[in-house]
Amino acid sequence: MKFILGLIIGILILPLCGYIYFRFGYAPVATAAAPMPFEKKMVSMALRAKIRAEAPKSSPIQPDEPNLTAGAKVYVVNCAFCHGLPSLPPTAAAKGMFPVPPQLFNADDMVTDDPVGSIYWKVNNGIRMTGMPSFNKSLSPTEMWQVSLLLNRADKLPDQAKAALNPTVAAPAKK
């Protein structure tokens, strides 16, 4: 009887501790706070499993120069604010986010090894609690594929696509 009572109390203590942890503000909610124990591991594991199950296996459009250049234009307008541009430092907003968004044209953060369908899944769905929005209501599927192809080939872009990533070239002139 004591064993069963101890087991029941042991099972109830864990959810109670979790409740107290969140209820009284011990959980880190500020972007500058250290992450919760196992937070990165748990979220990464769930994200990888979801992408593996749902990401498209191939792109319906070709990674040709017009699509890569179009993807660069989409990237400058919609992605560069957080994910940066080639040869430029991270923006002030990117530095203040948690987790810090990868600078996708920095050699350490490129996603050129990721399958293009995996990149597309992230652009289409967003990533919860990271600041990465879903673009499925603001970009067309073609635009999302174009930017996904651009990022998948970020280390070997044609000159026209590279030129479109230059903010002084890509941005319309202000009058």
Image (cartoon, helix red, strand yellow):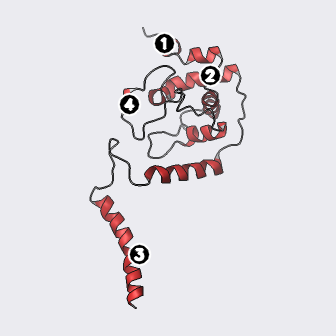
Name which of mark 3 and mark 1 comes first in the sequence: 3
Report, in whole angstroms, how far the alpha carbon at label 3 lies from the one at label 1: 60 Å
Name which of mark 2 and mark 4 comes first in the sequence: 2
Q: Which mark is residue 168?
A: 1
Quick one: quadrant of the N terminus? bottom left
x and y, in percent, of residue 94 in the image: 41, 31
Q: Which mark is residue 159?
A: none
Secondary structure, mark 4, is: helix
| Label 2–label 4 contact, CB within 8 A | no
Q: Mark 4 highlights which residue? A: 93
Secondary structure, mark 3, is: helix
| Label 3–label 2 contact, CB within 8 A | no
Report, in whole angstroms, how far the alpha carbon at label 2 lies from the one at label 4: 25 Å
Report, in whole angstroms, how far the alpha carbon at label 4 lies from the one at label 1: 20 Å
Q: Mark 3 highlights which residue? A: 11
Residue toward you, 39 or 141: 39
**Amino acid type of the residue tagged 2 in the rendering:** Ala
| Label 4–label 3 contact, CB within 8 A | no
Closer mark to the observer between disc 4 and disc 3: 3
